[in-house]
Image (spheres, rainbow, N blue to C red):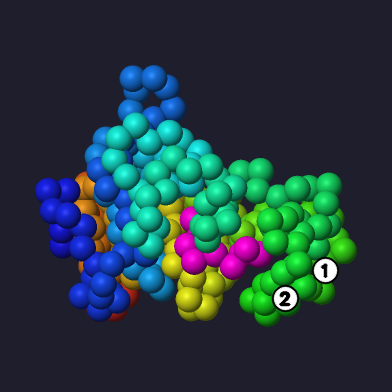
Amino acid sequence: MSTATDRPQAASDAPRGEPLLRASDLVAGYLPGVNILNGCDLDVYPGELIGIIGPNGAGKSTLLKALFGLVTVRSGTVTLGGEDITNKRADTLVHRGVGFVPQNNNVFPSLTIEENLQMGSFQAPRTFGERFDAVVDLFPTLGDRRKQRAGSLSGGERQMVAMARALMMNPSVLLLDEPSAGLSPVRQDETFIRTRKINKTGVSIIMVEQNARRCLQICDRGYVLDQGKNAYTAKGRELMNDPKVIELYLGTLAADQEAEKSASQPPPTA
């Protein structure tokens, strides 16, 4: 397992060559003189699913927003396919193949599902039919209910629409900010299955997630952020089973694992 003193590297079975997206030594924040990111690094190789976990206030969502041009990067660089995209406008990044699904307010409630997806392809309206068919292959429910207003959908269904809209421009990288937040356990599982399904189509994914256990179970590699810096990075399951990571950052995960261990023990005999 790599620590914050090491440059994060791809897992041993990750594709070789240059990263698709690289963030190097990012410093960023919302207020002048107040930094949330303090030298954060991130590498994403083609086809990877990257999970970002850590305590509240660690800078996880800020990192995604900095990658997507929603928070100003004060120093450091972001590259996509070797090209500098630091502080590019969000619409420019969408055109270049970066999709973003925010945690909140991620659908247009007064519009239908179909109209929401049309908004996702506004930069390339002629591709709408082709992309709609591709997205519906991933999410058949959206095709069946295309005329239903998004405001009448459940939280899990809205999350599905938000993901689908971000896919309408056929991105190479998809940024997901807390996709399971506020959902029931069943809907959370559906979201993680859906995320992996998208990833298997070839879309690289960077997912910030509060449900650390499920995130680390499905991601190829994980990053643990703390105080705006990389604390640890390794394969997802290595992080999930590392005692130090569990002790320092995943207290609830440790409790869950202990409960599972106890439940698996045979009952005492008289």
Check the picture and name the quadrant holding the N terminus: bottom left
Residue that protrudes farthest toward the right in the picture = 147
The answer to whether 85 appears left or right of 250 in the picture is: right
Where residue 223 sits in the image (x, y, percent)?
A: 29, 55
Mark 2 in CB contact with mark 1 (< 8 angstroms): no
- For residue 139, side relative to residue 58 (left or right): right
Quadrant including the C terminus? bottom left
Q: Residue at x 15, y 58 (%)?
A: 2
Of circles 2 and 1, the one toward us is 2
Above or below, 33 against 101 in this view is above
* Mark carried by residue 145: 1
Q: Nearer the viewer, residue 25 or 88?
A: 88
* Image coords of residue 148 (percent x, y): 85, 61
**179 relative to 262 in the view: left or right:** right
Give the structural element (helix, strand or loop) at label 2: helix
Q: Amino acid at mark 2?
A: Glu
The amino acid marked with disc number 1 is: Arg
Q: CA distance from mark 2 to mark 1?
A: 18 Å
**Which portion, as a residue range, is magenta?**
167-176
